[in-house]
Image: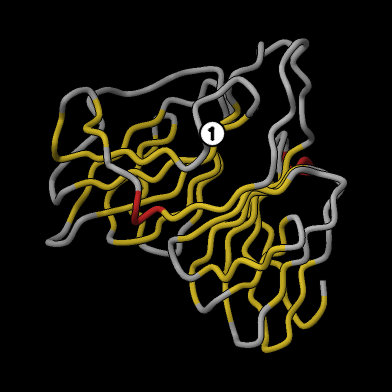
Amino acid sequence: MKNATAIVHAAPGIGAAFTEYTVEFEAGGVLGPAATQRFLYVLEGELEVGIARAKHVLSPGQYAYLPGGEKHPVKTSMPAKAIVIEKPYQMLPGTPTPKAFVGDEGKLLGQALNGDEWLEVRQLIPNEFAFDFAVNTMTFAPGATLPMVEIHVMEHGLLMLEGGGIYRLGEDWYPVHAGDFIWMGSYCPQWFGALGKVPAKYLIYKDWNRHPLG
């Protein structure tokens, strides 16, 4: 990493099985290749990502999936900010490994969660067995809530993108706003409700499509 600063939110050192961090790029900033697979979502400015000799310029709300061990240069000519998720890939017998791709959240159709049109989910990673994790955005209309307190085997990394609300973690309650990050370990009781006059939106990671015992 050159001309850039990493702000680490979650990593194996605190018990997470993945690493998630925000990168604040200066003009001329470069993010070097990773040994593990990487997901990158642009928050501010523009980033240039190289895939198969093609250059893709990503603006806020656009993203890229980059397999580990491959040279996919990430750089910028202007100040920029992105959230990055890295995780060692878990092979699945008989399943091809995923290829690099770029996407645009703004072009994805939102799906109502459990039929609730006040809560929209957008899947940024294809729901295919080749991928061993999922990244979604969830947008809550003012006053919308998750339908239940969830307890499950997946862990989460969650970055608030817009608005705010109240998050339950275990038996405690936390006010959250845009820019806040939450790491949730496996089996942590969790629930969210949006507060305020504007929608609340977050980007959420979870391990997926693999047996929890490996």
| Residue in the image at 58% along x and 60% along y | 83
Residue type at mark 1 is: Ala
Q: Which of these two is toward me, 60 or 23?
A: 60
Image location of residue 141, percent across then percent down: 16, 48
Disc 1 target residue: 134
Give the quarter of the image for residue 49. Answer: bottom right
- Number of residue marks: 1
Image location of residue 140, percent across then percent down: 22, 46
Q: Colour scheme of this structure image? A: secondary structure
Mark 1 nearby-residue class (10 Å; few <14, some 14–19, many ≥20): some
Instruction: From this view, report whether residue 15 is shown above or below residue 154.
Output: below
Image location of residue 34, percent across then percent down: 83, 53
| Residue in the image at 60% along x and 53% along y | 64
| Residue in the image at 65% along x and 24% along y | 130
Give the quarter of the image for residue 191. Answer: top left
In the figure, is residue 83 to the left or right of 89? left
Q: Secondary structure at mark 1?
A: strand
Instruction: From this view, report whether residue 12 is shown above or below residue 189.
Output: below
Q: Quadrant of the C terminus?
A: top right
| Residue in the image at 22% along x and 25% along y | 147
Image location of residue 194, percent across then percent down: 22, 48
Q: Which of these two is toward me, 151 or 88?
A: 88
